[in-house]
Each structure stands twice: as structure tokens, then as C-alpha cells.
């Protein structure tokens, strides 16, 4: 990976950051990504590229149909209850400052909601799992269940978790295709994750996906 100057300061909290357009070309065969996909728990301290971040966020929840706003994962009633956050460690992403960012799928951009490196606190919230502290970034996926349950009742809870599974698998496969690794984590203290990331009071954190360059 080419070496680029690391950003040690960045846009203010509340600033929008436009992401590079996601690639529509399948440079890596889907079948190969499925075959090679593994849970990765040890990462190098190598920074990843902003283009890789763009692809990962798009895979998790990006739009695939502008006219109706369809996204990269199936959603019951197209209600899209999931929210995606990006936690970036210091020198984790080339040309992107450490901080916490909230992804907006419709415009493929993200808003900075917290300054600084919060990866250590996120690791503590995840019961000390070292994979988080080693990762370049961590994608945090939360859900607003009230977007789905008014239409589907208690069954809507199941539909939200099904959508989460689709989003997480997309991230796994996209990471594999980019030469990166990840692991889905469900062991964490919800309140601590919400406090660290700045998740809204109507949201529930469902999973953490630390991502980075795998150790050999």
C-alpha cells in the first residue's frame, strides 16, 4: 500500500465528508470472496485507504437504486432500521483524522460526530477484546427498531436481525475482496458502546466489526 501523509487534524464536529464513489466493477470474483472469507482477529498497524472505507460503508448500507433509494441489503418493507457508524483510530485511515463518523447512505457521505481516537474505550466496552484495539477502523451497526415494529409488530424484531446479518456478511465479503479482514462481535456492553460512539437514544447497538490488514 502506498504511503501517504497522515491527517492529524480534520474537519470540525458536524462537518460532512463526501466519500469517493464506490466502484461498480467486480475486480474480485464473488465466489472467491466467499471461499476465502474468514473471521480475522489480529491486524497489522497498517493504515487503510479512504477508498476502502468508502467500499465497506457502501457494502454495509449504501444505496443501489437512486430512484427508490434501495440499499445494498434487503430490508423488510424497505424501512431500513440500521444505522452505521465508523470509528477510526489514530493513523488508521490515510488522509482521514481519528474520530467517530455517522454514515449517510443516500448521499454516500459521513458526518463527524466525535474527535479523537476512541478505539481504546470501544475495546473496553467490548469486554477488552484485543481485535478492536488492533484494528484500523471499527464499523458499529445499530438499529432503530421503531422503524420496523409499527408495521410488523414483534415479528419486526426478527426482521431487523435478519437485515443485520445481511449487512455484516456484505462487510465480510467486501473486506475480503479488498485484502482486509474483519470479525463480527456481539459481546459488549450496550450502554458503554452507545456512550463511546454517540449512538442516539432511540438506537440499540447490535454488532461491532473491527477491520484492518490481517496479520500474516
Image (cartoon, helix red, strand yellow):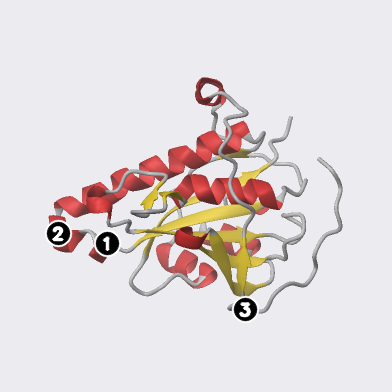
Q: Earlier in the sequence, mark 3 or mark 1?
A: 3
Real-space Cα distance between discs 3 and 2? 35 Å
Residue 99 vertical placement versus 214 (above, below): below
**Residue indicated by mark 2:** 151
Q: SS of the residue at dot 2?
A: helix
Q: Position of residue 101 (x, y in %)?
A: 57, 66
Q: SS of the residue at dot 1?
A: helix
Q: Earlier in the sequence, mark 3 or mark 2?
A: 3
Q: Position of residue 170 (x, y in %)?
A: 47, 39
Local crowd size for mark 1, using a 10 Å CA cut-off: few (<14), some (14–19), many (≥20): many
**Residue indicated by mark 3:** 13
Q: SS of the residue at dot 3?
A: loop
Q: Earlier in the sequence, mark 1 or mark 2?
A: 1
Q: Position of residue 207 (x, y in %)?
A: 44, 52
Local crowd size for mark 3, using a 10 Å CA cut-off: few (<14), some (14–19), many (≥20): some
Q: Which mark is residue 145?
A: 1
> Tags 1 and 2 in contact by the CB under 8 Å rule?
no
* Labels 1, 2: front one: 2
Residue 44 vertical placement versus 216 (above, below): below
Q: Residue at x 63, y 67 (%)?
A: 17
Residue 216 vertical placement versus 14 (above, below): above
- As rendered, which of 11 and 113 lies closer to the eye? 11
Q: Is residue 197 visible?
A: yes
* Labels 3, 1: front one: 3
Q: Position of residue 24 (x, y in %)?
A: 56, 38
Q: Residue at x 27, y 52 (%)?
A: 78
Q: Is residue 127 visible?
A: no
Local crowd size for mark 2, using a 10 Å CA cut-off: few (<14), some (14–19), many (≥20): few
Q: Residue at x 76, y 49 (%)?
A: 47
Amino acid at each position: 500500500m502506498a504511503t501517504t501523509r497522515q491527517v492529524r487534524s480534520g474537519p470540525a464536529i458536524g462537518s460532512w465528508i463526501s466519500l469517493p464513489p464506490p466502484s461498480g466493477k467486480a475486480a474480485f470474483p464473488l465466489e472467491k470472496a466467499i471461499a476465502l472469507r474468514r473471521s480475522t482477529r489480529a491486524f497489522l498497524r497498517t493504515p487503510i485507504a479512504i477508498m476502502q472505507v468508502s467500499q465497506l460503508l457502501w457494502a454495509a448500507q449504501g444505496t443501489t437504486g437512486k430512484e427508490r433509494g434501495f440499499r445494498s441489503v434487503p430490508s423488510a418493507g424497505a424501512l431500513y432500521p440500521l444505522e452505521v457508524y465508523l470509528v477510526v483510530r489514530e493513523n488508521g485511515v490515510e488522509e482521514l483524522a481519528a474520530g467517530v463518523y455517522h454514515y449517510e447512505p443516500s448521499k454516500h457521505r459521513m458526518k463527524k460526530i466525535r474527535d479523537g481516537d476512541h478505539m481504546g474505550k470501544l475495546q473496553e466496552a467490548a469486554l477488552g477484546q484485543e481485535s478492536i484495539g488492533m484494528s484500523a477502523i471499527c464499523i458499529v451497526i445499530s438499529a432503530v427498531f421503531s422503524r420496523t415494529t409499527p408495521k410488523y409488530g414483534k415479528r419486526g424484531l426478527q426482521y431487523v436481525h435478519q437485515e443485520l446479518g445481511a449487512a455484516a456478511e456484505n462487510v465480510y465479503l467486501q473486506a475480503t475482496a479488498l485484502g482486509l479482514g474483519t470479525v463480527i462481535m456481539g459481546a459488549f456492553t450496550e450502554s458503554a458502546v452507545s456512550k463511546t460512539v454517540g449512538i442516539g437514544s432511540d438506537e440499540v447497538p447490535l454488532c461491532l466489526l473491527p477491520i484492518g490488514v490481517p496479520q500474516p
